[in-house]
Image: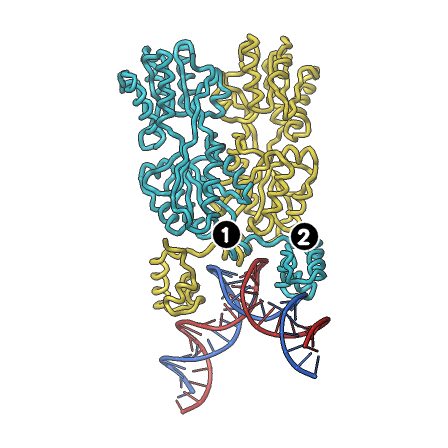
Chain colours: A yellow, B cyan, C blue, D red
Amino acid sequence: MKRKVTLKQIAKELDVSISTVSKSLRNSLEISEDTRQKVQAFAKLYNYKPNNIALSLKNKKTKTICIIIPEIIHHFFATVISGVEHVANENGYNVLVCLSDESFDKEVINMEMLANGSIDGFIMSLSKETQLKKDFHHITEVINQGMPVVMFDRVTNEILCDKVIIDDSLAAFNATQHFIDKGFKKIALISTVDYVSVGKLRTEGYIKALKNSDLKVDENLILKIEDTENFEDSIANLLSNNEIDAIFAVNELFAVTAIKIANKLGKKVPDDISVIGFTDGIISKYSSPSITTVSQNGVKMGGKAAKMLIERLEADEEEEEQYRTEVIETELVERESTR
Amino acid sequence: MKRKVTLKQIAKELDVSISTVSKSLRNSLEISEDTRQKVQAFAKLYNYKPNNIALSLKNKKTKTICIIIPEIIHHFFATVISGVEHVANENGYNVLVCLSDESFDKEVINMEMLANGSIDGFIMSLSKETQLKKDFHHITEVINQGMPVVMFDRVTNEILCDKVIIDDSLAAFNATQHFIDKGFKKIALISTVDYVSVGKLRTEGYIKALKNSDLKVDENLILKIEDTENFEDSIANLLSNNEIDAIFAVNELFAVTAIKIANKLGKKVPDDISVIGFTDGIISKYSSPSITTVSQNGVKMGGKAAKMLIERLEADEEEEEQYRTEVIETELVERESTR
DNA sequence: ATCCGATTCGAAAACGTTTTCGTGTTGAAA
DNA sequence: TTTCAACACGAAAACGTTTTCGAATCGGAT
């Protein structure tokens, strides 16, 4: 086992100074051709690689960014990481992944733990608990220390920073409008409780579309699911309403579960009921019938977020103070669950 | 914006030495009660947190581990990360995620880039290309430098290190045996090409089960899918054989696709054909019919891998040279795709 | 007054870099 | 021979810690 070789060791071995070794390896003209060659050959032989930690300490840059997400088992978040990772890698950055598990405390601990020089910046999506508590002091603190933060998907207006979002309201509006255009009359909504920002926005879009077409907004057709809830029963209850001819669900899970329960209740999808989901993930693609869905391009979102963060990191120091909010386009992917 | 405060600044401000500040904060008895209080109060006021990079340099420990996986959009790998992250966090470690994208080069680059002090150890699953090339020099090199590596799932015998695997062969054997026990005669296999280690092992288990029950191994019932292939047609071709009454697929995707194609060909699952998949992921759970599958507990695998790595990191220096291979149990989860 | 032990603190090294600045040597020009 | 630039290299600081060791001060005991 040969330990990593350092500048000091090379210097000692070749009987020159550390500075000479360093300069030689960076091909400084200050050093004679002879010495440079000698040092470089020796370094190559011993497979010298500069110690990243030492460099980080010196440069005050770690070339590492951290992404904090509520859950990784969510396909959407996995795609976001993928996008972040690729853009980061292209720019010579590494990606530290932290999971908040939808917990406020874990989010805070993670941020505080890493804000001490370990990383250069954050990309994050708020945990449900944080959204519920509306306590963002940990984020403000980090930003005040001069560390850039980019929020995506689950964001808040209370923090000023770069953001990457989709227009949840518009996307929901379009999905609902799609139903309306096809002549559906009783369009149900399966959403989350309102403190989840995206759930709220999607609900708003749904309502706006209905109102826009002078359709009645029927509270009985709107189901808002609590996080801890066993939602199968709630959905079954909703679907016992035989008038419903279309369902807009704010995520994949709700959509596929609705289809499953509809089947159990003897209703065929899409013949008796049409279903549109949200988030174009694995489930929508591979369930049968495959599910028409609002596609939310996670890879693109992550890539954009990483790009914004890195640009800010490499900007000439506080030059552009302007924060931007990028909107990623969504698209309705039509599949078998609608007719 | 207030920048991070350092020991030096505190020392200057309070007109004591850096050492005194450091010791005070660590509550050393060497320092008088008075001074300690004063320093601690000041540090708290200015929200002092030691710089992690400086600590890493000093301690030669980063408290960061890296997990290299081929793909993150794979639900299984996402669950593994989840397991790794949680165990790591419990032990005060952070997790750096690297994606090889199934590419040998990216795997090598990632490892070389991080083996220079950035992290304390690796957890990894081989990329397909690496398995194909059988070139593991980058891994040996890292291990030779004294950096521990734990491999999981896609491992190789050519590297000596800790490993976490499932008994792929046994799991496939059991799945196939399950079919045999139920009286199925024409059991098809949808596998990957042999250089993917798990594909090969699962194929072996399938064959072993058949032979064990004196059933003929019919090459026409075995489909080995190339990575780049458009496999839908191949599966359709396989299923045109009307004798087939059961299918064992080595992953979720093959299983769900087989079901879809069977449906198109007018065959009902499970009435006409039973299907067992591999990897208990989202697809198996939420497709209809839901898919009977060999459950491979990714969270447990990741957790175990992280535990093994951390134990080795914190062992009293080269004490236990013994490498271990842990086998995570699999389990057949029966759902609607089998009768 | 002297000595000794305890108490309290600071200087400095160490981790591995990069970079600035200074210094010594060489050669050629005066 | 002197002078000066060019050349080649080294010392040291800096990044932010921790820790070892030495030193100063003080009180009490002799």
Secondary structure category for the residue under label 1:
loop
Q: Disc 1 marks which amino acid?
A: Lys
Residue pointed to by mark 1: B61
Q: Position of residue A93 (x, y in %)?
A: 50, 47
- Answer left or right for B217 relative to B102: left
The structure residue drawn at horizontal position 30% and vertical position 17%, both measured from the top left corner, is B213
Q: Disc 2 marks which amino acid?
A: Asn
The structure residue drawn at horizontal position 40% and vertical position 18%, both measured from the top left corner, is B258
The reply to whether the C-beta atoms of the residues labelled 2 and 1 are less than 8 Å apart is no
Q: Quadrant of residue A277?
A: top right
Q: Position of residue B17 (x, y in %)?
A: 64, 65
| Chain of the residue that carries numbered disc 1 in the rendered image | B
* Closer-to-camera residue (A310/B132): B132
Q: Position of residue B184 (x, y in %)?
A: 35, 12
Residue B65 visible, this angle: yes
Residue pointed to by mark 2: B47
Which of discs 2 and 1 lies nearer the camera? The answer is 1
- Answer left or right for A145 relative to A333: right
Q: Position of residue A204 (x, y in %)?
A: 67, 25
* Closer-to-camera residue (A48/A299): A48
- Answer left or right for D24 relative to A306: right
Screen quadrant of the C terminus of chain B: top left
Point out which mark residue A62 bears.
none
| Chain of the residue that carries numbered disc 2 in the rendered image | B
* Marks 2 and 1, the one that precedes in the sequence: 2
On screen, residue B203 above or below A38:
above
